[in-house]
Amino acid sequence: MKKNSFIEGTIIATLAIVFTKILGMLYVIPFYALVGTQGAALYAYAYNIYSLFLEVATAGIPNAVSKIINEFNTLNKQEAKIRTFQIGKKLLSFIAIVAFIIMFVFAPQISGMIIGDLAGGNTIQDITFVIRCVSFAILIFPFLSVSRGLFQGHNIIYVSSYSQVIEQIARVIVILCGSYIALKILHLDLTHAVGVAVFSAFAGGSCALIYVYGKIRKNKKELFLDKEFKKKDDVTNKEIIKRIIKYALPVIIISIAFTIYNNIDMILILRTMDYLGFSAHEVEFIATGISTWASKISIIVTSIGLGLSSSLIPAMVEAYTLKKYDDVNRKFNKAMEIIIFVTIPMCVGISLLSNAIWTIFYGYSKLGASILSVCIFSPLFTNFYTVSNYTLQSINKFKTVYISAITGIVLNALLDVPFMILLDYFGLPAYYGATLATVVGLSVTVLIAMHVLKKEYNFNYKEILIVLKKSIFPLILMIGVVILLKLIIPLNVTNRIGSIFYVGIISVVGALIYFIVSYKMGLFEEVLGKDFYLKIKRKFKRNKKEV
């Protein structure tokens, strides 16, 4: 099996994730139209809780297994590597079963915590049903995650990436076809239709698991899974379990903390908007709009960070194991540069076109467009956090992981309600306060991480600053062109087809301006690295000659 370099792995992982996220963006258009605002809110409640339990069941251990496998592979300890994989599967089996039982049995209590005394929308019984429907997916994903970690630990990124594509395609098919059949053919109620939709997580995970296990069976020899080791490596099972817990614990704690906060964030928004006098319909729309539906549009931005993290961990662990700290610094800078170069213009463009984009996905809503125009910047800072956090984990700076992440979470939670009330007092949209609190919390987390990396490993961020400075000019040009085109091209915000053409024309022209100017300024070479840039350039010229 072909191993992938850091940049190649990043591109493969990012393209796969972008594709899955685009599917995740597009399915919401017919799904939202089918189930309406109330059904969409019900779907969001179930998925937010499912995300929390999924973090409990999978966060940390797959990454820890991937990291340990990479270390043992680098040190040529093949037998210990295989034992790590087997132990990881057993640990996750136990955790997954416990998480599933808790989620299924205590669904009524969880539902009551979500909506409290809010009346006029979804009921506790409705939310309980959909939470139980999605809970079955918890039994699949731990095994899928640790199996993906096996390949990532060998720097084989494409298997994990392709499995995500398969998972998303199957999931989208079940969501759309299942909810349509439930509502339009079987004439079931909205709650049962949404229950079918959330059950798609189980269906998608099952399809991906079949693919990954097929790859494992096919490549047992390369992965050393078919070999009978006569002698064990000088690493005991107890030591492996200790290392898994050591590597996984920070990720588990921080991931759970962030997921808990995201759910608390939604509850705080529900309570604060209710306190400020918004109707039950507006409260549910704003809370789920911020936590779920604006996020569905912005996941293409988040996918950059996810793609980077998929290849970042094995690449950094290998460099760190060989004590190549300059290489760790270079990979960190490269990841940050990609985020700056690609995601900042994406966020700005989506914000400027939020009216038309919200119309395309969910139908015209001034409130929805307003939410999206600001919420889109939260994933940008999430990407910075993802890279800095995974870097700290890769070099075993677990104490800093705790300090930086918990500081950001606490700050975020403390600022949430005050920011919303303060903005409302000044006549600004109160819900902007939730996003502002998130951005402040994430920024502090990233700054703490970067300070520690500079202080203890002499990290240099000069390359990041160069890319940031060079990106300003093409970004300003892009903003100017987009604003000018918005003034010239008429838009009927209630027309979905017209909005598609409107966004398509303006975004293509804006992107061309940004990337052409960036190319002329040498930003492509700066971000991709000279060797990889020249490799791509040679391939492009060769293909051009062949044509």
Image (cartoon, grey):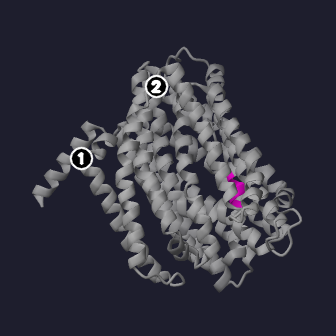
Q: Tag 2: residue type?
A: Phe
The residue positioned 53% from the left and 69% from the top of the image is: 354
Across and down, in percent, residue 328 comes to 43, 27
Dot placed on the residue nearer the N-terminal end, 1 or 2: 2
Write down the quadrant of residue 435 in the picture: bottom right
The CA span between labels 1 and 2 is 29 Å
Across and down, in percent, residue 357 comes to 51, 71
Hey, which residue is sitting farthest left in the picture? 545
Is residue 480 positioned above or below 450 on the image? below
Residue closest to the eye, 224 or 362: 362
The residue positioned 66% from the left and 23% from the top of the image is: 242
Q: Which residue is mark 1?
A: 536
Hey, which residue is sitting farthest top in the picture? 234
Please state the extent of the stretch shown in magenta in the rendering. Answer: 46-51
Across and down, in percent, residue 341 comes to 39, 48
**Residue 459 image label:** 2
